[in-house]
Image: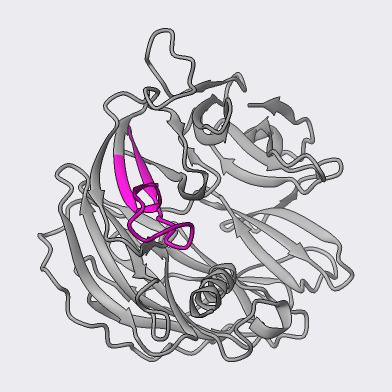
């Protein structure tokens, strides 16, 4: 029972990371800094970090300027890693073996454990495959469910495991990389059912060396920690405290308290950033800045450097969004999806420098979600009711920003 309850809590908090702004929220341009937490000391000191940080939160797949890596159902019970060429819309298995049928363990693109599929990331022209781990799917010692990290070339060759984690440990979504390392949070969820703890870790992607940098949590079942972004030099970690019912619902999470803090690459807290109630704003960290939208449809910017928040733009029309979510973007564009009290959905691309707002049309019978906003091509996904499998569409980015609705099939 405790395991089920804790799993439900993790799901609820993970859904809460994006936030849900409500129409009756008060304006919050002057949000208060969060109290500084006291993480435990690191278990092992890490060597000095190298290069600027880049944030990855691409659960749909990993996008480059000309391609997109994603998982799709294969033959039998296999799941296959594919690369889509955005210029042509054609996909191929990430496998360089001659004559491979892509339906067995010998294929580097194939994965058999549906309960523990990898999250693909791109790092220095290589693929990082992050298996989050799923200790609730079987016994903690079952290798298929263990959290681990693999590295491969972008054609699938040289795929190898570089790090493996303890039974019962689960990695959290949200990753950052520099020139040498992968940074993330993990939690030993099986052993910490009453007072869960999160550990900030790094893995050297060349040697596999794993360092525990800091520990958070241990307060109660109602507190969770998440890596939600980064600046060029520091990580942004969110703390969510559930103040209502633990079972996830819109009503129960409205009063949850969100807090952001900057953390350096050794796990030390640089400074607290902001604190708010979940029904007040919805936020994201993009390009080293914090953007947030309040219940009046106003988009604000915080430079994460202690300066005053600034108003970026007012969303068009009389929309008072009851729920706002942020999607992929590239400087200076942000993707926003809003739902009003009547249940109508609005989708915009917002230029954070000029205030320009561009909307895109829905997909027939399904929500059209922005997956990747590239310099030349943008990729969207949708799941028609009853179809089960995700459908991809692409469009030239210049056409999208000009308001075109000429989407092309892909995948």
Q: Quadrant of the C terminus?
A: top right
Left or right? Give the position of 176 relative to 360: left
* Residue 185 drawn at (x, y percent): 34, 65
Depicted 309 relative to depicted 391: above or below: below
Q: Is residue 48 above or below residue 236?
A: above
Query: Which corner quadrant of the image does residue 88 belong to?
Result: top right
Give percent across and percent down for residue 337. 71, 59
Name the residue at the top extreme. Answer: 99
> Residue at 57% across / 42% down in the picture?
372
Whether 243 is drawn above or below 154: the answer is below
Residue sitting at 62 percent across and 23 percent down?
89
In the foreground, 131 or 312: 131
Image: magenta residue range = 125-150
- Residue 55, horizontal then vertical, whole percent: 39, 54
Give the position of the N terminus as an image quadrant.
Answer: bottom right
Q: Is residue 81 above or below residue 255?
A: above
Residue 191 painted magenta: no
Q: Position of residue 192 (x, y in %)?
A: 37, 79
Q: Is 226 on the left or on the right of 379, as rendered?
A: left
Query: Farthest residue in the right direction?
Result: 342
């Amino acid at each position: 029972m405790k395991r089920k309850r804790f799993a439900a809590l993790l799901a609820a908090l993970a859904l809460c990371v994006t936030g849900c702004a409500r129409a009756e929220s008060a304006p919050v341009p002057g949000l208060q800094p969060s109290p500084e937490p006291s993480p435990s000391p690191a278990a092992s000191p890490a060597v000095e970090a190298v290069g600027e940080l880049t944030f990855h939160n691409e659960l749909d797949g990993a996008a480059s300027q000309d391609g997109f890596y994603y998982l799709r159902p294969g033959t039998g019970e296999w799941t296959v890693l594919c690369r889509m060429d955005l210029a042509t819309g054609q996909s191929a298995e990430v496998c360089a073996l001659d004559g491979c049928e892509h339906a067995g363990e010998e294929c580097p693109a194939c994965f058999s454990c549906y309960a523990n599929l990898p999250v693909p990331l791109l790092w220095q022209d290589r693929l990082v495959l992050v298996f989050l781990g799923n200790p609730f799917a079987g016994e903690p010692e079952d290798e298929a469910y263990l959290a681990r990290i693999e590295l491969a070339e972008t054609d699938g060759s040289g795929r190898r495991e570089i790090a493996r984690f303890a039974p019962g440990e689960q990695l959290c979504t949200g990753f950052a990389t520099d020139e040498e390392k992968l940074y993330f949070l993990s939690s030993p969820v099986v052993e910490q059912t009453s007072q869960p703890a999160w550990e900030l870790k790094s893995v050297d992607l060349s040697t596999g060396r794993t360092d525990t940098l800091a520990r958070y949590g241990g307060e109660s079942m109602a507190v969770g920690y998440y890596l939600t972004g980064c600046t060029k030099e520091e990580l942004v970690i969110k703390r969510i405290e559930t103040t209502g019912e633990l079972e996830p619902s819109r009503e129960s999470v409205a009063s949850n308290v969100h807090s952001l803090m900057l953390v350096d690459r050794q796990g030390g807290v640089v400074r607290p950033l902001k604190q708010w109630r979940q029904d007040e704003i919805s936020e994201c960290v993009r390009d080293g800045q914090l953007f947030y939208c309040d219940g009046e449809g106003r988009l604000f910017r915080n430079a994460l450097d202690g300066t005053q928040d600034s108003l970026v733009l007012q969303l068009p029309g009389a929309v008072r969004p009851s729920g706002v979510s942020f999607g992929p973007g590239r400087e200076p564009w942000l993707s926003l999806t809003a739902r009003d009290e009547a249940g109508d959905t609005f989708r915009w691309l917002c230029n954070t420098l000029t205030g320009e707002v561009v909307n895109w049309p829905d997909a027939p019978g399904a929500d059209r979600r922005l997956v990747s906003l590239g310099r030349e091509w943008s990729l969207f996904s949708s799941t028609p009711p009853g179809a089960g499998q995700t459908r991809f569409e692409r469009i030239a980015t210049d056409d999208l920003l000009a308001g075109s609705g000429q989407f092309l099939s892909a995948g």
